[in-house]
Image: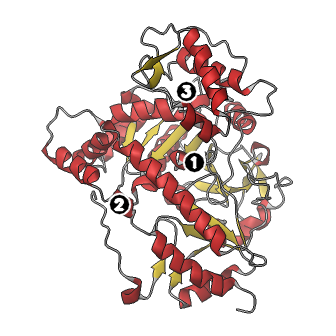
């Protein structure tokens, strides 16, 4: 649920919660009968006292917004939708996974690279049952788009009809669809701004579809709109005076790979910039549900109230694993008919059985419970990494508010990756996520002074740093073995 607190606003924390719930009801994000988190759970997620939440809930109950129903707090069934009273603007507000692993004893190898391991926690009776039900279900099954509409409303603050949602095979498939449609509309190659460092697979999609990727440096809070160029990169070490980027691809909820969260002020600035330059912002909302420190901000699309600027790409990969190639997108109203047409022409890459299985898994509440388990597992594994590498000189685990990967700053990336591989542990180098070195030289000229990242560390993207990127999907046992090797590799004198 998109609730959060801002300790710098000057408004009491209880008043903020009251105002946000009123606003969410007024905008239709929360509807009659929707459950709210318990006071204990919400207080823990927001980092506030339970009394603050209880007081806010009492105020809302007295106003007729909430009701207690068999131990659960819900939006009242007869709630009146009235304008929000808060002074806060909304902008602030295959199927079966196997447990089987190739044993380290047999292969001599532990793969800790992001996205490489199978998520063993998914091998449950509930998951298998969802696929059995999907295989035998007829046309009467509830469409996945309907489940996704509820999910987006309750978890990401995005209110869209089921028909507004396009099913994809994941973020790359969704990005390809959007770039094809935008390229046809504008009748030329698109200039696409991408984060640097960033998810290299998305950058490759831009290039594979015939468009131009323009790397933009990030800092501790992600991409800074002030760093967006006002000219076109010529590819020869110089800028040519021309139009600004047509598209900006960002990961505002959890910048990949450095982990910063884009604040509301910067999100609003990005939307203003995009409207001023008739650009489209593509938000890769890849792991919003895996935040375990504080409450995630609403999706960028929730701030796009005119529905004219933001495309949101969603995926189940970080929660259900790479073997489940199911995702979705929502887009500005102008693009939706063309996206639906293109999807129909190309055919859906996601089978009807897979869609029914994911829908069934969501309908029975299993996805929510599985996601909570994965949040706890990823948090535990990140702590394991921190403890294992503590007190090593010139080695630091970059603080992050959540996610399924960890970044470790090291003095010599190439040496660490090679030495770990010789010992049978595979990790990714942080340098893989920056654009080519020739382009990096250009980004240094437009980077601003670095902000402070979550946890107080600088995370400027203008200067590539030596580091390792580890996935957190491996079992605790494999991760512990891997950390023993990395400690030996990174200790002084190794």
- Viewer-nearest of discs 1 and 2: 1
474 lies left or right of 488: left
- Viewer-nearest of discs 2 and 3: 2
Residue 209 seen by the camera: no
Label disc, if present, on residue 307 of the rendered structure:
3
Crowding near the residue tagged with mark 3, few <14, some 14–19, many ≥20 C-alpha atoms within 10 Å: some
C-alpha gap between disc 2 and disc 3: 32 Å
Label disc, if present, on residue 291 of the rendered structure:
1
Query: Disc 3 or 1, which lies upstream in sequence?
Result: 1
C-alpha gap between disc 3 and disc 1: 26 Å
Please give the name of the residue rendered at 37% of the width and 29% of the height, measured from the top-left corner.
162
Q: Is residue 83 above or below residue 219?
A: above
Mark 3 element type:
loop
User: Residue 183 at x, y = what percent?
Assistant: 52, 44
Mark 1 element type:
loop
Disc 2 designates what residue?
A: 323
Please give the name of the residue rendered at 44% of the width and 69% of the height, measured from the top-left corner.
475
Mark 2 element type:
loop
Looking at the picture, tell me which residue is in the foreground, 182 or 349: 349
Label disc, if present, on residue 242 of the rendered structure:
none
Residue 479 seen by the camera: yes
User: Residue 142 at x, y = what percent?
Assistant: 25, 32
For the C terminus, the quadrant is bottom right
User: Residue 110 at x, y = what percent?
Assistant: 47, 80
């Amino acid at each position: 649920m998109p609730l959060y607190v801002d300790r710098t606003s000057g408004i009491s924390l209880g008043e903020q919660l009251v105002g946000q719930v009123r606003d969410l009801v007024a905008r239709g994000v929360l509807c009659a009968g929707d459950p709210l988190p318990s006071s204990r759970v919400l207080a823990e997620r927001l980092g506030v006292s339970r009394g603050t939440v209880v007081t806010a809930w009492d105020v809302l109950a007295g106003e007729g917004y909430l009701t207690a129903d068999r131990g659960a707090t819900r939006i009242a069934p007869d709630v009146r939708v009235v304008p929000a009273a808060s002074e806060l603007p909304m902008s602030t507000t295959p199927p079966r996974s196997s447990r089987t692993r190739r044993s380290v004893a047999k292969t001599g190898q532990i793969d800790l690279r992001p996205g490489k391991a199978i998520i063993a926690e998914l091998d449950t009776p509930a998951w298998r049952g969802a696929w059995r039900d999907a295989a035998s279900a007829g046309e009467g099954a509830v469409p996945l788009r309907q489940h996704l509409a509820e999910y987006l409303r309750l978890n990401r603050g995005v209110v869209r009809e089921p028909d507004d949602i396009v099913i994809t095979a994941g973020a790359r498939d969704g990005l390809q669809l959007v770039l094809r449609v935008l390229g046809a509309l504008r009748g030329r190659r698109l200039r696409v701004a991408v984060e640097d460092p960033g998810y290299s697979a998305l950058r490759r999609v831009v290039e594979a579809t015939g468009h131009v990727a323009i790397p933009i440096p990030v800092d501790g809070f992600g991409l800074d709109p002030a760093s967006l160029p006002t000219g076109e990169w010529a590819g020869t070490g110089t800028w040519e005076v021309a139009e600004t980027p047509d598209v900006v691809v960002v990961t505002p909820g959890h910048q990949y790979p450095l982990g910063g969260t884009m604040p509301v002020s910067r999100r609003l600035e990005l939307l203003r910039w995009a409207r001023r330059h008739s650009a489209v912002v593509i938000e890769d909302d890849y792991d919003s549900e895996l935040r375990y420190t504080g409450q995630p901000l609403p999706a960028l699309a929730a701030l796009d109230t005119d529905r004219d600027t933001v495309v949101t790409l969603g995926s189940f990969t970080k929660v259900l694993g790479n073997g489940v190639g199911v995702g979705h997108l929502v887009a500005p109203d102008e693009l939706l008919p063309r996206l639906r047409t293109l999807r129909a022409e190309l055919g859906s890459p996601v089978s009807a059985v897979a869609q029914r299985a994911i829908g069934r898994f969501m309908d029975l509440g299993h996805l929510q419970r599985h996601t909570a388990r994965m949040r706890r597992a990823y948090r535990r594994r990140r702590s394991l990494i921190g403890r294992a590498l503590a007190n090593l000189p010139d080695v630091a685990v970059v603080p992050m508010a959540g996610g399924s990967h960890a970044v470790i700053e090291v003095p010599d990336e190439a040496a660490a990756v090679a030495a770990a591989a010789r010992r049978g542990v595979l990790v990714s180098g942080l340098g893989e996520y920056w654009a080519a070195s020739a382009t990096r030289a250009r980004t240094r000229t437009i980077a601003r002074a670095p902000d402070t990242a979550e946890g107080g560390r600088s995370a400027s993207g203008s200067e590539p740093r030596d580091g390792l990127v580890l996935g957190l999907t491996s079992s605790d046992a494999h991760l512990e073995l891997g950390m023993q090797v990395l400690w030996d590799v990174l200790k002084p004198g190794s």
